[in-house]
Amino acid sequence: MSLPEYADVYNNFDPAALEAEILDGRLDSGLNVCHEICDKWASDPQKVALYYEKDGGGEGKLTFAELRDASARFANYLKSQGIGKGDRVAGLLPRTPELLIVIAGALRAGAVYQPLFTAFGSGAIEYRLERAGTRLVVTDPQNFPKLNDVKGCPPAMCVSASEAGADVADFYATLDEQSAEFEPVQIKGSDPFLQMFTSGTVGKAKGVAVPARALMAFYVYMKYAIDLREDDRYWNVADPGWAYGLYYAVVGPLLMGHATHFNPGAFTPESTYDMIRKYKITNLAAAPTAYRLLKANDHVLPEGENLGLRVASSAGEPLNPEVVNWIKNRHFCPVKDHYGQTETGMTCCNFHGLSHPLREGSMGYSSPGHRVVALSEQNEEVGEGEIGQLAVDVKSSPLFHFDGYTWGEKDPFVNGYYLTGDMVICHGDGSYSFSGRDDDIITTAGYRVGPADVESTLLEHAAVAESGVVAKPDEKRGSIIKAYVVIKSDQATSDDDSLRDELQELVRRRLSTHAFPREIEFVDELPKTPSGKIQRFVLRNRAKDEVEA
Ligand code: ATP
Ligand code: MG
């Protein structure tokens, strides 16, 4: 089957036609997101919304019809508590059917669903609940105790409340008392349906309310970048406690009437492969850190085994070319890099569902409905070969849906552009390569070096699992490049010095002589956000402290 040309789809993109096709043109007149992701698909009682792996093994299924009924019961409970349109309802739940019921039920009631990642401690939970003025938290016995330490905690509801010894409403017992009829509450395209917080990679997490019109952009991403097809088995490994998981493991696939998959527990290479085998996954999405971990544990996958993946997608951090090659060789499938933010959803992608040239190390082209550009420090669009800040040209981006931060953090809009805070190389053909976050770019001896390139090059060495590259202050050069490197567990060496030499030589030879890390420190692990992103500012501070010490 030949794919549509990217340029044709991009240039002829018609938002009104898309709205008519997928939302019956109801963004202005009113719609309900639960209707769009659930009721619409519930007439066939067999149609599955969720396949999930039960804790301790065993395959579970939740149909769209079951989700419709359970979400109506939950919405009735919300109503009985005086919770409705615009109110924040949080889920502090692992990847279980209850999570899906809470999301769908909140949306059915016109409320705004707020994810809380299950690895959060009470401080992180408190910060988010307090800011959002959340009205209800639904949790489970594992997470319930954290709420005891949350100051001003709103009322809670707990799955298996008696097991938790919790004197709060039990989730299923309460649902059983409610009617399975609930007329979905209508909201406008400009009304929020999700209350997000950014990952907090460079500081405090910022609040982002996502309006219902974002459904259009979510759909475009699923269709063209993920290329979700009817006969695909789709698994997005990302946790719905974060944007990529909530937007594209839950809302996106269900919006297309497509089943999604949840696995329990933490990510391990073994459990990932078991899940792919068991559910015959053909379409996989995950963060680069997951792919890097699979690669670092190459021995887990039997030589020559073909798991049957058709396509794989990566988002959230740079996808290193070395990982792309490894997946091609070991999984016989293409993996493509997609760029996005909590604020905007995915705006720049290599599209599995469209035909366009692929450039190694690039995160691709503007998504249909968006126009991304690179801006100079004077906020002028730069040309081929130049580095600039990635920005969205708002006027030329009908699917752009970010309205600004919920609680007045710095204004990211300048001259009609939304500034992403990320630096990219502009290739002049509409594609961009990620260079680093604004603050992560290193200036050494007058040159600007992006950490992404150096880290990708280090990964070419067989012993390297991952690395974080930052600037370390230096009297002579302003700063030098320092790499914190994690060695693969089966590659431990007693000769750090010769490995250091090899790595420096590798970067000199493969990347450039001015970009080689003058200092390399071997570490057991890198500082990461709860969602698994490398926090270079922590490394940068560490490097600075080393100088001052
Ligand atoms: P915070 O804004 O709180 O510091 P964050 O920016 O990590 O956290 P997210 O919205 O989860 O929060 O992540 C968006 C950021 O992730 C982007 O701005 C970019 O820095 C990075 N990112 C996303 N996709 C890619 C990609 N494909 N390649 C490189 N970086 C990416
Ligand atoms: Mg950010």
Image: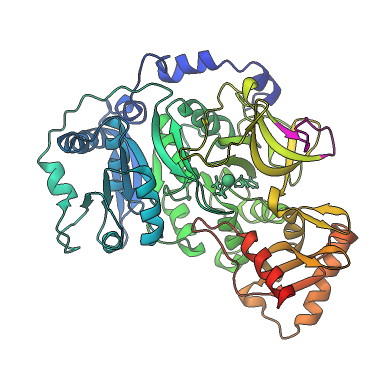
Indicate the quadrant containing the N terminus: top left, top right, bottom left or bottom right: top right
**Compared with residue 1, is residue 292 higher up or lower down, i.e. above or below?**
below
307 lies left or right of 390:
left
Q: In the orientation shown, which residue stands out farthest toward the left?
A: 177
Residue 288 is at least partly visible in this image: yes
Residue 462 part of the magenta segment: no
Q: Residue furthest bottom?
A: 494
Name the main secondary structure of what is drawn in magenta: loop
Determine if the magenta segment contains residue 379: yes
Q: How is the image coloured?
A: rainbow
**Residue at 17% across, 63% down:** 163
Total numbered labels placed on residues in the image: 0
Q: Position of residue 135 (x, y in %)?
A: 27, 43
Q: Position of residue 435 (x, y in %)?
A: 74, 48
30 displayed left or right of 500: left
Viewer-nearest residue: 440 or 545: 545
Magenta-highlighted residues: 373-386
Identify the image quadrant of the C terminus. Answer: bottom right
Residue 257 visible (yes or no): no
In the shown orientation, is residue 367 left or right of residue 80? right
Seen at 41% across and 19% down, the residue is: 23
- Give how far across and how far down residue 278 sits, in percent: 42, 53
Decide which of 487, 74 is in the foreground and name it. 74
Residue 362: horizontal and vertical position, in percent?
73, 43
Q: Quick check: 136 above or below 497?
A: above
Seen at 41% across and 15% down, the residue is 28
Q: Quadrant of residue 56?
A: bottom left
